[in-house]
Amino acid sequence: MESHYIGFAGIRDSIMSWRDLQWGLEQGLINHEDVVRFSDSTLDASDALADQLHLNLSTCYREDTWAIEDALNALVNAHNASVDISLWQYLVLRHVYINRDSYQDPLGEVASIYADFGFDEEVEKFVYYMPPSGCNPSRHTYEENITRLYANWELYLRTNRDKYFHH
């Protein structure tokens, strides 16, 4: 899988398990500092019975990678959850869309992400080499076809936003 570092900005306010966070770290999508920042952002200060493991992660020094990994492993082990690959696919596609002007070929990035995350049928609607449903690209200009792909990409992001982010 090609790594697309999305950082804390890419995961802020998202709905993810500790295992999701660990997977993102393992894939290079986020770093250790991002893990601590996410932990801090999800810690409910009003909760007197806050999970001690969560507190441990939130108080790690951002440079202490071993302590961060140990605290995250403890959280993963305590909260039995699996990785939501569709969440990470969404977050990476969102990151690339938001930053599309910094990519030489944003639609090429989409094609790579489509392959990396297992050829999700929902994403194929904005993969440039996939045949479109409901329209004949030969009846449209190159620019119109590109506009259609970007519109489908934006629709995917809007449609799925509530599934992956807190309101």
Image (spheres, helix red, strand yellow):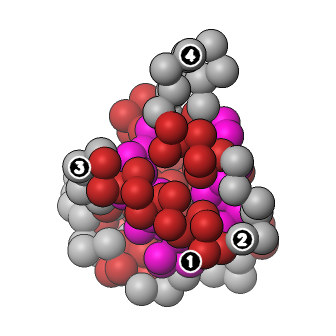
| Disc 1, SS | loop
Which marked residue is nearer to the observer: mark 4 or mark 3? Answer: 4
Count of numbered circles on the image: 4
Q: Earlier in the sequence, mark 1 or mark 3?
A: 1
Residue 31 x, y percent position in the rendering: 65, 69
Which marked residue is nearer to the observer: mark 1 or mark 2? Answer: 2
| For the residues bearing labels 4 and 1, Cβ distance under 8 angstroms | no
Residue 20 sits inside the magenta stretch: yes
The residue type indicated by label 3 comes to Asn
Q: Earlier in the sequence, mark 3 or mark 2?
A: 2
The Cα–Cα distance between marks 3 and 2, rounded to whole angstroms, is 25 Å
Disc marking residue 28? 1
Residue 83 sits inside the magenta stretch: no
Which portion, as a residue range, is magenta?
A: 14-41
Is residue 144 visible in the rendered structure shown here? no
Disc marking residue 80? 3
Residue in front for this viewpoint, 31 or 150: 31
Q: Earlier in the sequence, mark 4 or mark 1?
A: 1
Please tell me how crowded label 2 is: few (under 14), some (14-19), or many (20+) other residues with Cα within 10 Å: few
Q: What main secondary structure does the magenta stretch of the protein show? A: helix
Q: In this figure, which residue is indicated by the disc labeled 2?
A: 64
Residue in front for this viewpoint, 146 or 118: 118
- Whether 109 is drawn above or below 120: the answer is below
Residue in front for this viewpoint, 17 or 123: 17
The Cα–Cα distance between marks 1 and 3, rounded to whole angstroms, is 22 Å
Q: In this figure, which residue is indicated by the disc labeled 4?
A: 48
